[in-house]
């Protein structure tokens, strides 16, 4: 069982994309965390890199899903006033989708749900920031409890999140959305 980190006001939980380098992910996680630190003033922020393979194995997204739920549950118990911002890019978006109860089964590098953030902790999730979300290519999106707290970026032509998309490079351009995502999240905390 991982021990809880120090109690910050907001813990940014980031699930990187498949094979994405960087602490939280160089394309999305790291730039979004930097933007959040600029936009959310007067509150302390910590970050957590979801511990999962982020590879093409059939259990990768499920491993990340279990880690997100375990981390949020552990942190919420240790830090009752802490809130969370969930960030997911590509396969990491599947991880976050599953963790909030939206199955990514059948999506590119998706998996069935193995765990969900307990309903009692849902109010602690201030914002959900998704980029290149594979469930969108299936015509699905975040619905229910988390919908109003979710922003979901899909670049035009991105084949991972847009059915029929053919612009592979579009999937690599989400750094450009870091500021918009941070502005959205800042409005929710």
Image (cartoon, helix red, strand yellow):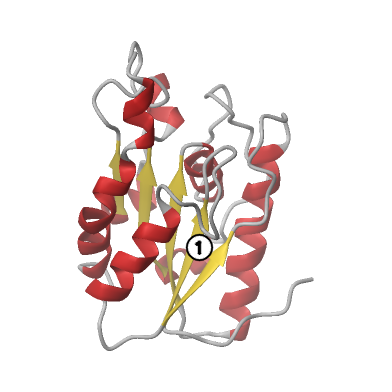
Q: Position of residue 85 (x, y in %)?
A: 41, 64
**Left or right side of 33 for 77:** right
Q: Is residue 140 visible?
A: no
**Left or right side of 92 for 172:** left
Question: Residue at the location (66% across, 80% down)?
Answer: 4
Q: Nearer the viewer, residue 83 or 175?
A: 175
Q: Position of residue 47 (x, y in %)?
A: 50, 70
Question: Residue at the location (37% across, 55% down)?
Answer: 128
Where 85 falls versus 9 (above or below)?
A: above
Can you name the residue that lies furthest to the right here? 1
Question: Residue 123's quadrant in the figure?
Answer: bottom left
Where 31 falls versus 155 (above or below)?
A: below
Q: Position of residue 87 (x, y in %)?
A: 43, 54
**Left or right side of 149 for 113:** right
Q: Which residue is mark 1?
A: 13
Q: Nearer the viewer, residue 51 or 140?
A: 51
Count of numbered tags: 1
Q: Quadrant of the C terminus?
A: bottom left
């Amino acid at each position: 069982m991982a021990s809880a980190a120090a109690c910050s006001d907001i813990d940014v939980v980031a699930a990187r994309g498949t094979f994405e380098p960087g602490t939280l992910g160089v394309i999305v996680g790291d730039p979004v965390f930097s933007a959040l630190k600029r936009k959310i003033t007067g509150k302390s922020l910590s970050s957590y890199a979801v511990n999962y393979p982020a590879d093409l194995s059939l259990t990768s997204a499920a491993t990340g899903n279990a880690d997100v739920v375990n981390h949020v549950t552990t942190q919420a118990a240790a830090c009752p006033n802490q809130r969370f911002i969930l960030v997911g890019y590509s396969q990491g978006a599947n991880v976050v989708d599953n963790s909030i109860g939206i199955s990514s089964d059948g999506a590119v590098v998706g998996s069935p749900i193995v765990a969900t953030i307990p309903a009692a902790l849902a109010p602690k999730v201030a914002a959900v920031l998704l980029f290149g979300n594979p469930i969108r290519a299936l015509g699905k999106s975040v619905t229910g409890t988390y919908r109003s707290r979710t922003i979901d970026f899909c670049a035009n032509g991105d084949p991972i999140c847009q059915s029929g998309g053919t612009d592979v490079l579009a999937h690599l351009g989400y750094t450009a959305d870091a500021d918009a995502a941070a502005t959205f999240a800042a409005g929710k905390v």
